[in-house]
Image (spheres, helix red, strand yellow):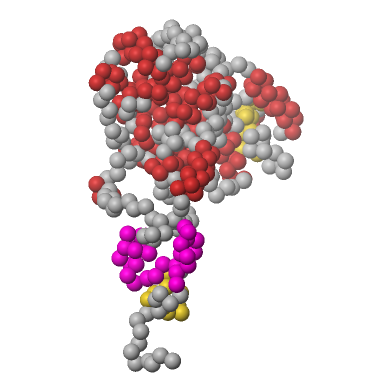
Amino acid sequence: MYKRFVPALFSTNARQARQIRATSAWINRARIDADSTLDQSVDAEKLFINADVQRLLTELTGMDLEGKVFKTRRTEIQQRSHFALMTDERLAQTMDKMRAEARRFLNFVPLKEPRSQEVTVLSRDPEIEGFDNSKFVFTDITFDATDQDRTVVVREVDGTLRTATPEEHDRMNRTYYEKPNRPVFPPPVFEDPYLEDALNRKEHEFVLDWACWFFEPDDPAYVKLVQHVFDRVIEKGDFDVLHSTRHFGTMVFYLALNGNIPPLLNFFGARGRLHDCANLVRLQKTLHPDWRFVINSGDTDLKIVTDFVKQNARHREQLKDLNAFLKDGTVIPSTSQEMPNDERKSDTREKVTVDASNVRGRSGPLGDLSEQYDVKVVKSEGEAEVAKDEHITRKERRGRFWRKSERDPSKKED
């Protein structure tokens, strides 16, 4: 009996896929601005991949190499730190490679509309009502079926045969095709009180990274979780915790789509980033072409931001830090990413330029250890190789350094 419903299932799914979504799930009615002139039937996915939108989001995301992209992270395999002495030219080349690698790490998470929660009733069989006190789930485990198009149907206790919900569909995929990163049931951190505790500890990026690891981008649970985290960031003003991460662009798009950019605009203005403020206004204009705000091609960043502040006087309280910067140049340092007092380490070491003249002295990389070790320069800058008879050294080699050995007076020289 199950076989005869398979063609109907495929035709139903195709018909639902062709239907135009009336309202985007990324539109938050509680936060939408009345002046945004937002079309409720907006295609958020198409807007997100627009070339101009992607360019603006990339510029707004930033690239903090040491503080964010390549910071210390929790990993299963510990990696040893690597230190190297480089010339200025080699250092510049290495930094270019690191920036290229960082751009790969900062690729945005795909923004997708969630799958429909509606189910399709395939059959009603009242004659088998009450046949069992549990539901039966039938899963297509055909070899060539993928996690996306796999057919899953549910037989209810009352005899109704229906399609599975997205949660049931994904749970069956995780049950039959187990993956190390996807247990059958979602981790507790995705729900309160564990989620609230993680966000209080500024673990927003950790939660979102784990969500990307566990959910599909079009999972309704994923969209709901991401919006909850974004709303929490907006409420607390903790934009620093996601800045220069792969999730920042999605959050900026979420704000601009709902016409709710004043909180983020105030964040950029408080740190004196006028260009980012102007790009944020440009982004909202790109998403809302009918917005009652004019931006000419020759307008400077200062003019765009100033015009926005004048036109949106009702947001004066939300833009107080931006107004202070425009008026007096006041800049507020970032505070949301500060480390706890017991984890702060003051680095008062003087930075020294190492060259061939001081690489063997106390001002070189060894410091006081230079009195115990001789430095063997593998590639010196125009200096001849160290004379062999300059010091009496031991045969035992340790790394690139040779330990000094004093002359034994009991032994006579040949």
Q: Main secondary structure of the magenta part?
A: loop
Quarter that holds the N terminus: top right
Residue drawn at (40%, 29%), measured in percent from left and top?
A: 230
- Residue 155 visible from this viewpoint: no
- From what the image shows, is residue 111 above or below residue 105? above
- Residue 346 visible from this viewpoint: yes
Label total for image: 0
Residue drawn at (57%, 37%), measured in percent from left and top?
A: 170
Instruction: Indicate the quadrant where residue 10 lies.
Output: top right
Q: Which residues are magenta?
A: 360-387
Nearer-the-camera pick, 91 or 283: 91
- From what the image shows, is residue 307 above or below residue 235? above
- Residue 143 magenta: no
Nearer-the-camera pick, 64 or 152: 64
Quarter that holds the C terminus: bottom left
Nearer-the-camera pick, 119 or 407: 407
Residue drawn at (67%, 33%), measured in percent from left and top?
A: 149
- From what the image shows, is residue 369 above or below residue 243? below
